[in-house]
Image (cartoon, helix red, strand yellow):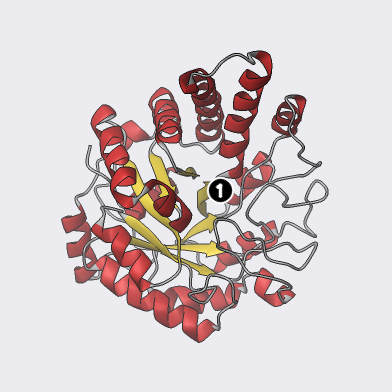
Amino acid sequence: MARIALRQLLDHAAEYGYGVPAFNINNMEQIVAIMAAAREADAPVILQASRGARSYAGDIMLTRMVDAAEAMHPDIPICLHQDHGNDEATCLSAIQYGFTSVMMDGSLESDAKTPASYDYNRDITRRVTDLAHAVGVSVEGELGVLGSLETGKGEAEDGHGAEGAVARDLLLTDPDQAVEFVQDTGVDALAIAMGTSHGAYKFSRRPDGDILAIDVVKAINERLPSIHLVMHGSSSVPQELQDEFNRWGGEMPQTWGVPVEEIQTGIRHGVRKVNIDTDCRLVMAAEIRRIATEKKSEFDPRKFLQPSIDALKELCRQRYEAFGAAGQASRLRPLPLAEMARRYRAGTLTPGAPAKDAA
């Protein structure tokens, strides 16, 4: 099955009322686990790579592994997405390597640390959107800065994230400004700031409306019912995973992530893409620690990695089912990127106008 543009996948998700987990990848084992879960669940896949992942694995290695995943699972639609592109060069190089979607995160300046002005964000996102749409590639933008409403600070991961204190008005996307931003940039999906952040340490207590602003999701969805919303930093960091990690020698302090039921509420109000990374790292690390503790003489890497693949596959399957993506892969009929480009040029893929022939 041809690699699919994010826009078509999210249009399909909107039509059928589900969300798609977007799993970050760095290596073969993660890709194998994610794809195995997708096959079991009959779910479409978003594989996303940060700049850190591209540097770690190398663009050629990373994209060839995704090529292999396509060949092994020809009936599963795959979107390959650049996560948190920091400038035009990052996004364009991703497109050259076969990514079918790019995120231009203009909420921060190109150093990926300094909050940017609205004008900067609008202008750079518009430029990337024009270039990407010309070849049928989708674009995700971001308005607002990821960070904690508890601490008032950003959270960096893989070299991306605001440093130091961030004004509260930047930590919450303004719904009216979101309308303006989507109109100004033509993005296919909009990542919003609502109190989530990267990493494991998102909240010091189970989140409520004071520190996880689901109301922002609802307000934007009311104003932009057809735009596809994206929740970043949405690992749930389940208690059982924390306990398992610590049981085998880990030292993770008590923390809280984004509860699955809160994500499900978001999906009912226009969230179509849900970014998950920490959960994947945590479940694999816990298994590797277990093997290292239980079998101290073991030195075959496969004996550590296969159990971690199995554990990650189960976590991914659970997320596909919880978000309603299970059973949707076989309903999709992918459109070639050339056809997506033609529709962008024809003006039939303006924000909120669904790609036809999606199912």
Number of numbered tags placed on the structure image: 1
In front: 186, or 106?
106
From the image, tell me which residue sits under label 1.
267
Q: In this view, does 61 lie above or below 102?
A: above
- Please tell me which residue lies in front, 321 or 202: 202
- Residue at x 46% of width, y 54% of height: 50
| Residue 129 versus residue 69 in the image, above or below | below
Q: From the viewer's perspective, is 273 left or right of 253?
A: left
Q: Is residue 188 above or below residue 124?
A: above
**Residue 205 shown left or right of residue 10 in the figure:** right
Taking the image as drawn, is residue 90 in sight?
yes
Examine the image and state in which quarter residue 46 appears: top left
Query: Residue 170 at x, y = what percent?
Result: 66, 74
Q: At numbered mark 1, what does the secondary structure look like: helix, strand or loop?
A: helix
* Residue at 76% in and 64% down: 149
Quadrant in which the C terminus appears:
top left
